[in-house]
Image (spheres, rainbow, N blue to C red):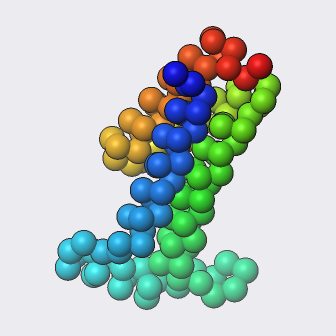
């Protein structure tokens, strides 16, 4: 088993799930109410924006970021690159544990375990 590739695929799946969840949109009437309030709440930061716009941009960016990070893990060819990915995903894992649901941080923690195993088995060489 190639732990590095498995870790990268897990992170890419997380990114795809994140983008799909955003694309599927609201699930309940209360979601629509919250979205409406976010669209009405203006933020004047380097121009006029809405809270919904910021949320959308950050949500899509996060999904794309996970896809990129998964690709980077798979393509990493040396120990430094793999350890850099480990540090990056460790930080994302801490944020996820504090602010999001168990699926996201569970996938991140499993991917972290696979990266550690990959470093131990020297799969970067």
Q: Is residue 32 left or right of residue 57?
A: left
Frontmost residue, 31 versus 76? 76
Residue ID at (69%, 86%): 47
Residue ID at (79%, 25%): 78
Q: Is residue 119 left or right of residue 109?
A: right
Residue 2 x/y as whole percent = 57, 24
Frontmost residue, 60 versus 96? 60
Is residue 74 positioned above or below 25 on the image? Answer: above
Q: Is residue 55 left or right of residue 82?
A: left
Residue 116 x/y as whole percent = 58, 19
Residue ID at (77%, 19%): 125
Residue 105 x/y as whole percent = 42, 39
Residue 90 shows in the view: no
Residue 25 shows in the view: yes
Residue 75 x/y as whole percent = 72, 38
Is residue 93 positioned above or below 101 on the image? Answer: above
Going by the picture, which residue comes out furthest to the left?
29
Is residue 81 positioned above or below 119 on the image? Answer: below
Is residue 77 positioned above or below 59 on the image? Answer: above
The answer to which image quadrant residue 124 occupies is: top right
Q: Disc count in the image?
A: 0
Residue ID at (65%, 51%): 68
Going by the picture, which residue comes out furthest to the front?
1
Going by the picture, which residue comes out furthest to the top?
120
Frontmost residue, 91 versus 124? 124
The answer to which image quadrant residue 118 occupies is: top right
């Amino acid at each position: 088993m190639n732990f590095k590739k498995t870790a990268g695929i897990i992170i890419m799946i997380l990114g795809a799930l994140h983008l799909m969840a955003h694309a599927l949109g609201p699930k309940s009437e209360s979601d629509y109410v919250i979205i409406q309030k976010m669209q009405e709440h203006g933020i004047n930061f380097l121009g006029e924006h809405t809270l919904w716009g910021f949320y959308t941009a950050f949500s899509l960016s996060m999904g794309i970021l996970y896809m990129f990070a998964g690709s980077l893990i798979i393509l990493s060819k040396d120990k430094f690159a793999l350890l850099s990915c480990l540090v990056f995903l460790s930080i994302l894992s801490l944020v996820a544990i504090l602010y999001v649901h168990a699926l996201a941080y569970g996938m991140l923690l499993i991917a972290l375990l696979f990266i550690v195993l990959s470093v131990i088995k020297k799969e970067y060489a």
